[in-house]
């Protein structure tokens, strides 16, 4: 292996910063390239390319740089992709950037690398989990196969035909399957009457054995993958600690064995394997910055070489499994959107391949720092803080962006278009990972149970107070912004602490917790969640906790609102139906509150069409200028806020 200093970076260029902030469209138009992936033999790169109006799948030859689109639709975007052999790919189609409505998912397709033999292999509404590939154009997947039953099956990507892999299931209501490297389903998790059971079998013909049972969500291990010996099982487990680590599983003792990797700050669960080398290569993690613990020394040295050549970015290596001469490097930072490089490991040399957003100039963007602050009960709250470039860093107007979910994976360090957009307008930006956000360990997660509107909301307030006390933020110029659950937290924050905030932007916002439990039956993801005891553990019981829900539901607390609010909804949203907005709007009218209102009739749970997305963020831009750039005295006698839209 060449020494670290030999790595050459080819065709690096510098750009000058723009004196004026970018217009709204430059932040929120889709990237030119996304999700680039190297074929197993290293000969081709597949990826998503921005289209007009829809994103397409393209394949480019690594050596000749020739290629182009191989699959695109007039009414749907290609969403993601996977090489299943050197000649064939599978991908899904739907509305890009969709935040959760099943109506906007259009199924799975397969296609050859030259664009031939395009076949739909699973219909709209089907949701499949990838279990593996047999290398012959077939994939192992998990999904609803026979009625509502969650099955594991082999899917022929040329014909779409299925072959079920576990006709005799160990128990009803399987929620998770795991196959070994030969494609034999060897492990399963069932859930019945809120009890999870972990099942195992030695072979295809061996009987299923129950190896553990526990209350839903409380199994001691989560099976991740078998190794290539078909005996070694890797699991994610807490094992008496607060953060989940990676272990080998001891079937004899029915507990965790050797620990493979752990991180003191975050949970770990992502494994990186090589089929060609028949071994576990590394374990990925996402802490204050993402990274990989390489267990294979050769890859560790390659990582060091790339990091020396690209010191300002986090660099994720994807080495061609069957041809280690070629690797794809995904480089990004808080100030720099993803740039892709080709790494020739034999020379060695890096060559720039594609920029996701070439119009973004890193020298004109702002630093997005990982921070922690204390909540009032002592819990540490992780967050990302962006201070506008060129500002004094003191007495700034603040935008608090609240993520949706709320039980979703943690935010990650890197270029964030929302943070950069707000910072480009002169606002500090706080993006808190309040309790309940996944990835920070068991305590951070479980501290959120039953806390919608209570300690979960206090975590956001405490972050704002921390910034005020540090002198970073002007306490009279603070605005909340959020979508879905984040929209709920925005509205409730304006009502719970009405003197703290100048304004709020809530889009596709849930407005009543009780109403969340009443919805159209075809939104199956929410049916399964809210009708389970798990949903009631996390949120509460809509009958028993009716008064509690109303005490923290914006729909019933409108009279407490003082600040102006911008409300936006999708007319065909399945996750948070429009009635959440219209009922709140009626309540606002009854109490004489001023607001801005807009509905995008052709949108679901998020604004996918560029004309709508651009229109919405232009409104946000104008709204923030109106309310965060005023003198403090004007708050006592604000200019009337005129309702818009219909």
Image (cartoon, grey):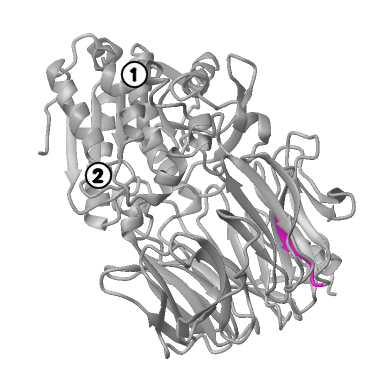
Image label count: 2
Classify 474 as above or below 193: above
Disc 2 designates what residue? 616
**Horizontal placement of 549 versus 240: left or right?**
left
Residue 220 x/y as whole percent: 74, 42
Image quadrant assignment for residue 41: bottom right
Q: Does the magenta stretch include residue 227?
A: yes
**Horizontal placement of 28 versus 109: left or right?**
left
Residue 620 x/y as whole percent: 27, 37
Query: Which residue is pictured at 60% across the width and 80% down the height?
Result: 39
> Around disc 2, counting alpha carbons within 10 Å, would you say few (fewer than 14), some (14 to 19), or many (20 or more)?
some
Mark 2 or 1, which is nearer the eye? 1
Magenta-colored span: 223-228
Query: Which residue is pictured at 28% across the width and 44% down the height?
Result: 617
* SS for dot 1: helix
Classify 469 as above or below 351: above
Quadrant of the snapshot with the N terminus: bottom right
Residue 8 x/y as whole percent: 70, 72
Q: Is residue 611 magenta?
A: no
**Horizontal placement of 430 versus 346: left or right?**
left
Residue 210 x/y as whole percent: 74, 53
**Horizontal placement of 56 versus 274: left or right?**
left
Give whichever of 553, 483 is nearer the camera.
553
Image quadrant assignment for residue 413: top right
**How far apart are the two marked residues, 2 and 1, measured between alpha carbons?**
29 Å
Give whichever of 290, 405 is nearer the camera.
405
State the mark number for residue 550: 1
> Around disc 1, counting alpha carbons within 10 Å, would you say few (fewer than 14), some (14 to 19), or many (20 or more)?
some
* SS for dot 2: helix
Classify 394 as above or below 52: above
């Amino acid at each position: 292996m060449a020494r670290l200093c030999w790595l050459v970076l080819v065709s690096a260029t510098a750009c000058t910063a723009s004196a004026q902030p970018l217009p709204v469209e430059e932040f929120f138009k889709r990237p030119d390239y996304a999700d680039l992936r190297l074929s197993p033999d290293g000969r081709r790169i597949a990826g998503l390319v921005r289209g007009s109006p829809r994103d397409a799948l393209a394949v480019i030859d690594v050596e000749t740089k020739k290629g182009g689109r191989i699959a695109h639709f007039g009414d749907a975007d290609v969403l993601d992709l996977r090489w299943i052999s050197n000649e064939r790919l599978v991908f899904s189609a739907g509305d890009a950037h969709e935040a959760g409505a099943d109506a906007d998912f259009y199924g799975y397709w397969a296609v050859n690398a030259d664009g031939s033999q395009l076949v739909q292999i699973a219909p709209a509404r089907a949701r499949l989990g990838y279990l593996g590939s047999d290398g012959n154009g077939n994939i192992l997947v998990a999904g609803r196969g026979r009625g509502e039953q969650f099955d594991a099956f082999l899917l022929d990507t040329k014909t779409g035909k299925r072959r079920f892999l576990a006709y005799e299931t160990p128990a009803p209501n399987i929620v998770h399957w795991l196959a070994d490297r030969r494609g034999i389903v060897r492990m399963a998790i069932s859930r019945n009457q809120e009890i999870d059971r972990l099942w195992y079998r030695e072979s295809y013909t061996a009987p299923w054995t129950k190896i553990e049972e526990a209350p839903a969500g409380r199994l001691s291990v989560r099976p991740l993958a078998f190794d290539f010996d078909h005996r070694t099982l890797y699991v994610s487990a807490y094992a008496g600690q607060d953060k989940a680590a990676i272990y080998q599983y001891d079937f004899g003792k029915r507990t965790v064995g050797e620990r493979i990797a752990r991180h003191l700050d975050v949970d770990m669960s992502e494994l990186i394997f090589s089929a060609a080398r028949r071994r576990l290569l590394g374990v990925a993690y996402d802490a204050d910055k993402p990274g990989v613990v390489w267990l294979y020394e050769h890859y560790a040295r390659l990582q060091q070489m790339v990091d020396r050549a690209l010191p300002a970015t986090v660099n994720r290596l994807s080495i061609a499994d069957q041809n280690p001469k070629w690797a794809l490097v995904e480089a990004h930072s808080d100030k720099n959107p993803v740039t892709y490089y080709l790494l020739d490991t034999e020379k060695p040399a890096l060559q720039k391949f594609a920029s996701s957003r070439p119009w973004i100039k890193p020298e004109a963007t702002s630093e997005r720092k990982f921070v922690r602050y204390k909540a009032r009960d002592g819990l540490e709250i992780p967050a990302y803080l962006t201070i506008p470039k060129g500002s004094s860093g003191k007495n700034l107007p603040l935008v608090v962006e609240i993520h949706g979910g709320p039980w979703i994976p943690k935010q990650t360090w890197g270029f964030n278009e929302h943070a950069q957009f707000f910072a480009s307008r002169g606002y500090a930006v706080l993006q808190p990972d309040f309790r309940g956000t996944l990835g920070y360990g068991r305590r951070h997660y479980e501290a959120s149970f039953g806390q919608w509107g209570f300690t979960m909301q206090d975590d956001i307030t405490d972050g704002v107070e921390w910034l005020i006390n540090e002198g970073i933020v002007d306490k009279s110029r603070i605005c909340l912004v959020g979508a879905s659950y984040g929209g709920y937290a925005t509205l409730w924050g304006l009502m719970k602490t009405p003197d703290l905030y100048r304004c709020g932007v809530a889009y596709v916002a849930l407005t009543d917790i009780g109403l969340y439990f009443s919805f159209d039956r075809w939104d199956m993801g929410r049916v399964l969640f809210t009708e389970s005891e798990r949903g009631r553990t996390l949120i509460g019981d809509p009958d028993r906790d009716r008064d509690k829900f109303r005490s923290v539901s914006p729909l019933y607390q409108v009279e407490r609102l003082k600040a102006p609010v911008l409300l936006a909804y999708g007319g065909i949203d399945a996750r948070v139906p429009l009635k959440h907005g219209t009922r709140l709007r009626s309540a606002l009218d009854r109490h004489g509150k001023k607001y801005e209102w807009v509905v995008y009739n052709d949108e679901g749970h998020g604004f996918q069409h560029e004309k709508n997305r651009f229109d919405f963020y232009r409104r946000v831009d104008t709204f923030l200028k109106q309310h965060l750039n005023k003198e403090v005295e004007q708050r006592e006698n604000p200019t009337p806020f005129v309702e818009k839209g219909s």
